[in-house]
Amino acid sequence: MTQPSTAQRHGSAPQQRDHRGADPRRWPDVATVPASPLRARAAELLLRHVARRLGLRVQLPGGALLNRTPPPPDAPVLRLRAPGDFFQRVGAGGLIGFGESYQAGDWDSPDLIALLTVLAASPGTLVPPRLQWLRRWFTPRRPAEQLGTPENARRNIQAHYDLSNELFALFLDPTLTYSSALFATGPDGTPAASWDLLAPAQHRKIDRLLDLAGVGHGTRVLEIGTGWGELALRAAARGAEVVTLTLSEEQQRLAEERIAAAGQADRVEVRLCDYRSATGQFDAVLSVEMVEAVGRDYWPAYFATLDRVLAPGGRIALQAITMPHDRMLASLRTFTWIQKYIFPGGLLPSVEAVRTTLARHTSLSLTERHGYGAHYAETLRLWRERFTARADEVAALGFDSVFQRMWTLYLAYSEAGFRSGYLDVQQLLLTREGDVPDGGHRS
C-alpha cells in the first residue's frame, strides 16, 4: 500500500477552500488553498531534500520532525503549523506559494532571519540538478501588465509607495529615507547600527552620493525617484537647484510639504513625471534604488535618459541593489512573490548588466563603485523590528494580519538576502570619457 503523505496524515485533503482569517476579496490566493495532491507530494519530498542538504529542522504540529535524520542542534527551524496547506501551496506555486503560506500562517520560525539566510545562500541549488528541467513547467511567468511601460510604471510604483505615508512613517526614521543607510563602522568593519544612529546614517549615505556627484552651490540637480524628499532637501541645503521626479502622488504631496517647511521651496521642484519624460540639462543626476523598478526591457531607456539629460562634464550618482549576474539571468522571466505582492515589475540588475547596457546604449561608463551590503542588512533589521513593535498602530491604519505577515516576510527576506551575500547595495558613479574623477574603486 502507498504510504500517505504528510499532507494527508495531517488532515489537508486536496480541495479548494477558504483559509480562515484571510479576506478572499483582498487576498484571493491566500484565502484559498489550491488542490494539487501530486505537486503537494513533490513539495514534501523537495523539502525533505532541502532540509537534509542545508541542515534545517522542520517541525510538525505537536513537535515531531519531518527530518528523517536528526538535524544539527543549532539548525534553523521551519515550524509547519498547517503542513497540508503548506505543501499544497508550495506544490502549486513554488516560492510564491511559500510566501503565501507564510501570509496565511501555515508556517513560522522562531528565528525567521536565520532560516531565510540559509535559504538565500543557495537559491540556485534548492531544486536538485536532475529536476531543474521541471522549473519551466512549475515557475509562473511575469504578467504583461507588470512590464515597465509608461502606462504600467505609474501603477506599479503606486501599488507600493501609495499604500500610506502614515504606514511608512511608522517604521522609517524621521528622515523618511527608504533605502540603505551607511553607518559608521568599527575596527573590524562591522556597521555600528542602532535606531538612534539610523537618521545620521541616512544622512551619511545621502552626503556621500552628493559628494560623488559633485553637488554644491549652484549645481543643477535632477533626482529620479523623490522618495519623501530628503535627498532633495540636503542638495538644496548645499545651494543646489533641484528638480526631482516621482510617480507617487502620496510621495509628491508629503515631499512638497516637507520641502516647504524647510524653507527650500524656491530651490526644489517636485514633478509627477515618468523618468522618460525628463527634460533639461543637469550638472548632476542622482537616483537612489530606482533602477530596480524599471525592468530589464526598459534599462536601455532609463540609462539613455540619464545620458540625455546630463550636461557636459556632469556626473551621475546612483544607488542600486544588485544581484549576481547568473542569478539575474535565471530570474529574467520568472514571476516572484516579491513582484506579485511587494514590487510589481521590479528586477534587480547585476553590475555586469549595468556595464553592458551603458556600453550599448549610452556614452556613459561606470567609473566608480562602492558596495556596502552589510549596512543594508542592518537597515532592514531596524525597519523590521520597528514595524513589528508597532503592529497595533499598523492595524489601526487598516492593514490586516495578512498584510502585516506579508510585510514582515518582505523585510526579513530582504535582510536575509544581504546577510547571505546574495544581494549587495552599491553606489555607482557614471561619467563620460574624459570626466573620470580621481579615487574610488575603479571598475
Image (cartoon, rainbow, N blue to C red):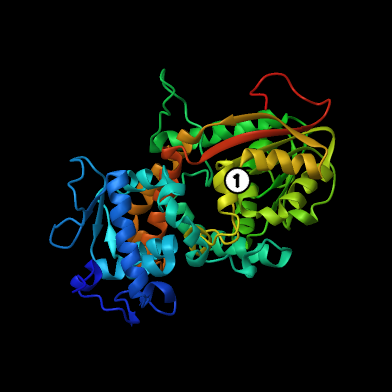
Could you tell me if residue 127 is visible in this image? yes
Nearer to us in this view, 436 or 76: 76
Q: Is residue 254 above or below residue 361?
A: below
**Residue situated furthest front in the rendering:** 1
What residue sits 52% from the left and 58% below the top? Answer: 165
Q: Nearer the viewer, residue 215 or 21?
A: 21
Residue in view at x 36 percent, y 48 percent? 116
Left or right, residue 12 beside residue 281: left
State which quadrant residue 318 falls in: top right
Q: Position of residue 346 (x, y in %)?
A: 59, 56
Residue 7: percent from left, percent from top:
25, 70
Residue beneath the point at 73% across and 29% down: 216
Residue 400 appears in view:
no
Side (left or right) of 105 relative to 186:
left
**According to the image, label 1 marks what residue?**
289
**Which residue sits furthest right?**
312
State the image coordinates of residue 240 (x, y, percent, origin top left): 74, 36
Residue 302 shown left or right of residue 63 in the figure: right
What is the secondary structure assignment of the residue under circle 1? loop
- Image location of residue 391, percent across then percent down: 33, 58
The quadrant of the rendering that contains the C terminus is top right
In front of the other: 79 or 66:
66
Which one is in front, 5 or 84?
Answer: 5
- Assign the N terminus to one quadrant of the image: bottom left
Of the residues shown, which amino acid type is indicated by label 1?
A: Glu
Other-residue count near label 1 (Cα within 10 Å), few / some / many at <14 / 14–19 / ≥20:
many
Q: Which residue is depicted at the point 34% across and 63% down? A: 43
